[in-house]
Amino acid sequence: MTSYPVPAPSADGGAGFKLLSVFLGLVVVIMGSFGLWLALSAQHAADRAATAKSAATSMPGMDMTAQAGRATQSFAGAAPANADSLAMAHAAYPATLPAAPAGGVANVQLTIGHDVVSIAPGVKYEAWTFNGAAPAPVVHVRQGQLVHVTLKNASPMPHSVDFHAARVAPNAAFSDIAPGASKTFTFRANDPGVFMVHCGTAPAFVHIANGMYFAIVVEPANLPHADVNYVLVSSEWYLNKSGLDGAASLDLVKAEQMTPDWVTWNGYAGQYKVHPLTAKPGQTVRFWVVDAGPSLNTEFHVVGTLLNRAWLNADLVDAPQHDIQTAVVPAGGGGVFDVKIDQPGIYPFVSHSFASVMLGEVGLLNVGNVPGTMSH
Ligand code: CU
Ligand code: CU
């Protein structure tokens, strides 16, 4: 550490020298702290590089060798010249809640694969998927049904499935299965709500960030009637390149820093702006919302109305709250929200954490089939 010469105190300038000494002492402390911070930062960067390297060797299919502890640039909003026509041609993820099976047993077949998916117009991503999509198609069961899960791993590495709706020993039901292997397990869907399902193989963070999630609706018998039911899954995407020329894969550092390139409803930026959800005036529209994360919450808000009923945290056992402006759906959680809109128009639904809107998490509910569009 550099030392600073301090003049000897003299009879006439004692107070001034004391002040100067205190000041210089402070400088030494600050410089010392800065040096320590530099050393710790360097050590931290080295640790991260080592972690990224070991992750690269332990996770086939992921190239993280270029990530020596530093995130790539942002690719937010990257779009080809024909983005509009690509968005139009893209078949929107079916948000409509499918019918639940009749009888006492609900069979859920899941095949795990590694597939290239589109996450925005012209943007491709090397995803890890259930049933070929991120999110996988919605599963709908009735409260009390026995859910019989068949999981098949058609990918080149171990994966698993974790149902938040289940009360089962996870070390058995949610355990990894090897490439080519299959397993079955059951759970009784006793708890109503809308729940996240995801791959729980370590690091679950990476498996979720790569697209391994979907929503399961466990519908109770006693909910007030809804005319239309839509399921929305929020998630973030962290890209190591734009995905415009060849599929991107995960930028682990960006994911750790929670700086996504895209945030989507049902896996594709802005898809319900181009292909709006619809309702008739006066209908009750129920949104079953899951936030898959992996890390950011969703602040669910419908522009131009309030949430008439809000079952926060998808708690369908207790009474809902009423007339809510914005409801938090936590990462790894759900919420059920009813709106009843009488006036025809175009009503955007967003995460009111508006950075997410800029990154693609905005859709439109067209009430009454009115012409036009709306940005927000
Ligand atoms: Cu997995
Ligand atoms: Cu979980």
Image (cartoon, rainbow, N blue to C red):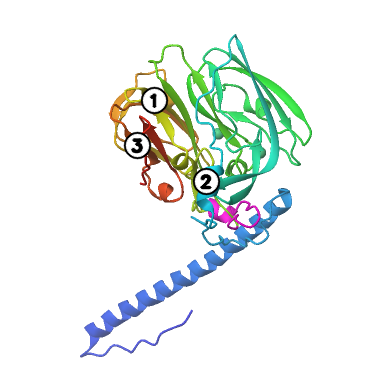
Q: Which residue is mark 3?
A: 347
**Magenta part of the protein: which range?**
241-256
Q: Which residue is mark 2?
A: 87
Q: Position of residue 233 (x, y in %)?
A: 50, 35
Residue placed at 55% from the left, 48% from the top? Answer: 86
Given the current orientation, which residue lies at the most extreme left position? 12
> Marks 1 and 2: CB-CB under 8 Å?
no
Q: Which badge, 2 or 3, comes first in the chain's sequence? A: 2
In this view of the protein, can residue 140 be seen by the observer? Answer: yes
Disc 2 marks a residue whose amino acid type is: Ala
Disc 1 marks a residue whose amino acid type is: Val
Height in image: 216 above or below 85? above
* Location of residue 251 by image quarter: bottom right
Q: Which residue is mark 1?
A: 285
Label 3: element kind: strand
Q: Position of residue 234 (x, y in %)?
A: 48, 39
Label 1: element kind: strand
Label 1 vs label 2, nearer the camera: 2
